[in-house]
Amino acid sequence: MSEDSPPSAPPPAPLPKKKRVFLTPAPIDPVTGRPDPGKLNAHQAALRQAVVDAFNAKKARSFLQKHVHHISVNRELSEGIRFLFDEEGHAPANAPLEDIVDERRKIEYQILWLDGALQELRHRLIRIRELEDYALEMLSQATPTE
């Protein structure tokens, strides 16, 4: 700094901080003993509404997923047996026996494949349950200071 410059002004005093408002438990309705949503402050009400909306969205999503899966399985089933019917949905008078036998063999193969996959998943589940039981046993034997 040069000696000619005027002295600088002191920094302004910091603004007083507002006291932070903490979320408190929801007020209890004395009649029912349950939280009363009507007595929540605005911030608590907004948080409550956000949780309710998230819950409803998750519930609706699982409902739709279940029904979409049901529809797709039914569609696959209908595609699998469509060859047995004509354009109007009526069974033909003389369906070729070879097609019916081929379709039966295909379905039997798919059942065998699914059965093998199911057995493998059951085996994995048994191993995971054994590991879980062992881990819980080790936790129960551990001292609280560890």
Image: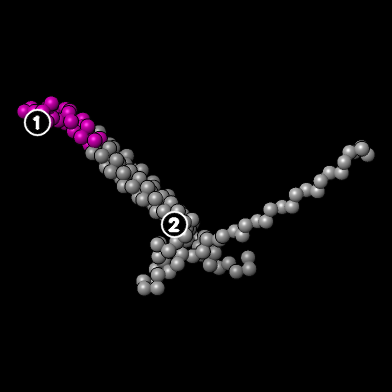
Residue 19 painted magenta: no
Mark sitting on residue 45 = 2
The numbered mark at residue 50 is: none
**Can the viewer see residue 105 in this picture?**
no
The mark lying in front, picked from 1 and 2, is: 2
Q: Amino acid at mark 2?
A: Ala
**Picture layout, residue 87 above or below residue 112:** above
Region rendered in magenta: 75-103
Q: x%, y% of residue 71?
A: 25, 39
Q: Residue at x 46, y 56 (%)?
A: 42
Which quarter shows the N terminus?
top right
Quarter holding residue 146? bottom right
Q: CA distance from mark 1 to mark 2?
A: 59 Å
Image coordinates of residue 96 in percent, x first then y, are 13, 26
Q: Give the mark nearer the N terminus: 1 vs 2.
A: 2
**Percent coordinates x, y for residue 28 in the rendering:** 43, 69
Decide: few, some or many residues near mark 2? Use Cα within 10 Å; few <14, some 14-19, many ≥20.
some
- 111 to 131, vertically: above or below: above
Q: Residue furthest bottom?
A: 31
For mark 2, give the secondary structure: helix
Give me the residue at 35% from left, 45% from top: 61
8 to the left or right of 60: right
> Label 1 is placed on what type of residue?
His
Viewer-proximal residue, 60 or 22?
22
Q: What's the colour scheme?
A: one colour
Query: Which residue has dot 1 on it?
Result: 90
The reply to whether residue 106 is in sight is yes
